Image: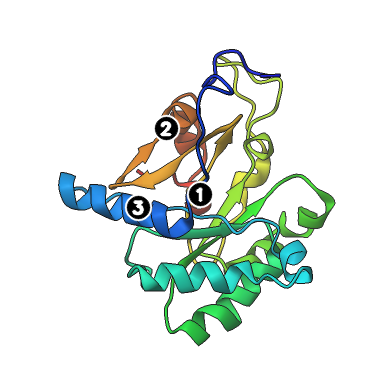
């Protein structure tokens, strides 16, 4: 049963899931043919679960990124994960072993495991490993906010010593990504960006365009 009537109709064709390599080839091919420089924002999902099953996603993803020429923080590539242990492992082990240096983004929700980060010392510790901090939208905007009455949390007051920028804000199922120096899927930022920028001088929540 199709849960969302407006989505692509089920059972009308057969599609397979593209591999990361195929996605990178598609993006790089389109960049070449259009003259653009579209970036990528891959996420390492549930790394602890996969490690327990004998699959090291962190090393596999980094190896694939290197194979396709993503090797520097100067490039438009942001590697993200909700796992604090994986962020540390990427920074201390995997990236040095691979000989590349990429921007890492620490994704966070309102779960208990992230609560230690939401203070000055916690943010400083995160800043030792991550280049960006990606809070769920619900951590920034109160759920009962309306377009005319945004209620902003105090999380924006925290600073990271590396002056990282908030480059990912979730709005339902919409994600903002850095693409060719602009933000794709702008709808998720339109209603929030101007208010956040006026209220949040901290570089952690500077909206990237």
Does the image show residue 77?
yes
Whether label 2 touches label 3, CB < 8 Å:
no
User: Which callout, 1 or 2, points at the residue further toward the start of the chain?
Assistant: 1
Q: In whole angstroms, how far apart are the C-alphas of marks 1 and 2?
A: 16 Å
Identify the element where label 2 is drawn.
loop
Query: Residue drawn at (32%, 50%), measured in percent from left and top?
Result: 27
Residue 166 is marked as 1
- Residue assigned mark 2: 185
- Residue assigned mark 3: 39
The quadrant of the rendering that contains the C terminus is top left
Whether residue 3 is situated above or below residue 206 in the rendered picture: above
Protein image colouring: rainbow
User: Which callout, 1 or 3, points at the residue further toward the start of the chain?
Assistant: 3
The local crowd at label 2, few if under 14, some if 14 to 19, many if 20 or more residues have their Cα within 10 Å, is some
The local crowd at label 1, few if under 14, some if 14 to 19, many if 20 or more residues have their Cα within 10 Å, is many
Query: Residue drawn at (73%, 73%), measured in percent from left and top?
Result: 54
Q: Is residue 129 left or right of residue 27?
A: right
């Amino acid at each position: 049963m199709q849960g969302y009537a407006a989505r692509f109709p089920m059972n009308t064709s057969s599609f397979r899931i593209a591999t990361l390599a195929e996605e990178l080839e598609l993006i790089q091919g389109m960049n070449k043919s259009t003259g653009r420089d579209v970036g990528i924002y891959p996420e390492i999902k549930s790394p602890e679960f996969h490690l327990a099953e004998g699959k090291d996603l962190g090393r596999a993803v980094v190896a694939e990124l290197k194979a396709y020429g993503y090797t520097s923080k100067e490039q438009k590539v942001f590697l993200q994960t909700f796992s604090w242990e994986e962020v540390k492992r990427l920074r201390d082990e995997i990236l040095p072993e691979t000989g590349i240096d990429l921007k890492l983004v620490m994704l966070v929700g309102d779960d208990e495991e992230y609560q230690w980060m939401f203070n000055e010392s916690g943010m400083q510790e995160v800043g030792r490993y991550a280049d960006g901090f990606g809070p769920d939208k619900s951590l920034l905007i109160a759920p009962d906010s309306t377009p005319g009455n945004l209620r902003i949390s105090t999380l924006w007051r925290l600073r990271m010593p590396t002056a990282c920028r908030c480059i990912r804000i979730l709005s339902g199922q919409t994600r903002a990504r850095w693409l060719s120096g602009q933000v794709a899927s702008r709808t998720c930022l339109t209603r929030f960006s101007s208010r956040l920028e006026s209220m949040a001088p901290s570089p952690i929540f500077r909206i990237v365009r």
